[in-house]
Amino acid sequence: MGLTGERLRADLDALAAREPRLARALARIGYPEPRIRERGYKTLLRTIVGQQVSVAAAASMWRRLEAELGPDFTPACLLERDFDTLRACGLSRQKQSYARSLCALVAAGELDFAALPADDEEAIALLTRIKGIGRWSAEIYLLFAEGRPDIWPAGDLALQEGVRRLLDLPERPTERATRALAEDWAPQRGSMAIFTWHFYANPAI
């Protein structure tokens, strides 16, 4: 389960006690809402379906895929479909390759979403074995679907810009710099990431 509202508030209160800029921002815009996703391979499959298309287009493709495979489809259901069938659902050749990679790993028992490694880096390494799933997608899954408390997706551009604004930096930090800047926020970087996105998106800032 993802990070609950109660956990977010507790983490952010603890961080604000030692980070005055966060305390001021919290006072101005309040706490973020929880961002919780379903645990399991379907959440990553939806990520693949949604890559490089609009939210509306991704939703349309997902509806067609569910209509073809059934609402409770298993990885084997997708693997049984041929190219043209999945293409009719809107999946390009590349997306089909990525989706088959995910489903094949799950069907073979090489990827068990109920028992991912407890170590974050080991879990990221396992998830990125899936074609089309990079570090960012793996981190987002671990943060939103598993609620891992110390995930910090430093490669996210909105996160980088949020950090720039929050810390009043002269320019947006690089991925490496964003990772380094967050070291003092461990082991609650997951809650800090969710707040940073909230801060970035808030029109009052």
Image (tube, rainbow, N blue to C red):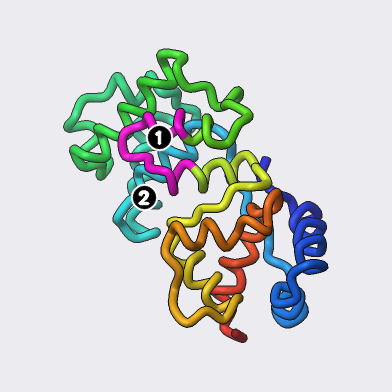
Q: Residue visible at 60% across and 76% down? A: 166
How far across and down, in percent of the image, does residue 199 sit? 60, 73
How far across and down, in percent of the image, does residue 144 sit? 59, 47
Mark 2, Cα crowd under 10 Å, few <14 / some 14-19 / many 20+, is many
Three-letter code, disc 2: Gly
How far across and down, in percent of the image, does residue 151 sit? 59, 47
Q: Earlier in the sequence, mark 1 or mark 2?
A: 2
Residue 50 drawn in magenta: no
Q: Residue visible at 40% across and 52% down? A: 59
Q: Residue visible at 48% across and 31% down? A: 41
Name the residue beneath numbered marker 2. Answer: 50
Q: Residue 128, labelled with which disc?
A: 1
Nearer-the-camera pick, 108 or 194: 194
Residue 132 drawn in magenta: yes
Mark 1, Cα crowd under 10 Å, few <14 / some 14-19 / many 20+, is some
Side (left or right) of 38 relative to 33: left
Identity of the residue furthest to the top in this view = 108
Residue interval drawn in magenta: 125-138
